[in-house]
Image (spheres, rainbow, N blue to C red):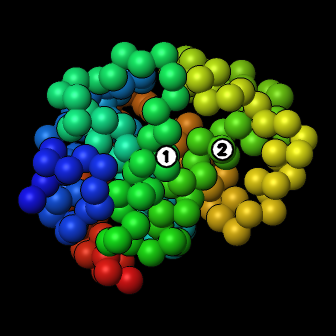
Amino acid sequence: MGATNAPDGQAASVDEVLGLYRSYANDRYDEDITQLDHALQTAALARSEGADDALVAAALLHDVGHLLDLAQHGQRSTSTEDLGHEGRGARYLAALFPPSVTGPIALHVRAKRYRCAVDPEYHDGLSDGSRASLVLQGGPMSVAEAQAFAASPSSASAVDLRRWDDGGKVDGIEVPALDDYRPLLESLAGG
């Protein structure tokens, strides 16, 4: 049973999720580093700032929706539309992980749109890939959207995740390996 057989299904085990990373995360998507390097760097940043285990897991797994797209299509989609990787990833993980993991994942794209709305200088610090995807994702939020986002329960965690996401795009830095996160993921799975 693997994500490649049912990319829109739900994860059944930590092994399945880690297998998805092993099989598909060497793609660079729209950044200069691989999806795996980005995931590991994002999680390492979360851990270095003292994030709780659920938020470290969210940081590690936040782009799993991109990997589901690769599993489904066998290559990166060339769509000029936003594929909603954040929602797809959160739904895939929902049967295995609690909302404290999936909530920030589901909101991390909206957190980028929010930050662009409330801090115009934030946009200038985005990577080229993040700026390009922002256009497809709807651009900066309106005032009403930003107010609604700020009131949502996972918004603060999603903004933290977004900060680590933005920082986790450095070529060549050493961070813990994927398997180093297995105990953390297993402790959260099923909860």
Distance between the alpha carbons at the discs numbered 1 and 2: 9 Å
Q: Amino acid at mark 1?
A: Glu
- The quadrant holding residue 1 is bottom left
> In the picture, residue 38 is in which quadrant?
top left
Of the image marks 1 and 2, the number of the one nearer the N terminus: 1
Closer-to-camera residue (29/8): 8
| Pointer 1 with pointer 2, Cβ within 8 A | yes
Q: Residue at x 31, y 76 (%)?
A: 189
Q: What mark, if any, has residue 38 been given in the picture?
A: none
Left or right for 165, reference 175 = right
Helix, strand or loop at mark 2 = helix
Of 134 and 40, which appears nearest the observer? 134
Image position of 101 with respect to 133: above or below:
below
Q: Residue 102 location, x and y as percent? A: 48, 63
> According to the image, label 1 marks what residue?
86
Q: Is residue 26 left or right of residue 94?
A: left
Determine crowd level at label 1: few under 14, some 14-19, many 20+ residues with C-alpha closer than 10 A.
Answer: many
Residue that numbered label 2 is attached to: 110
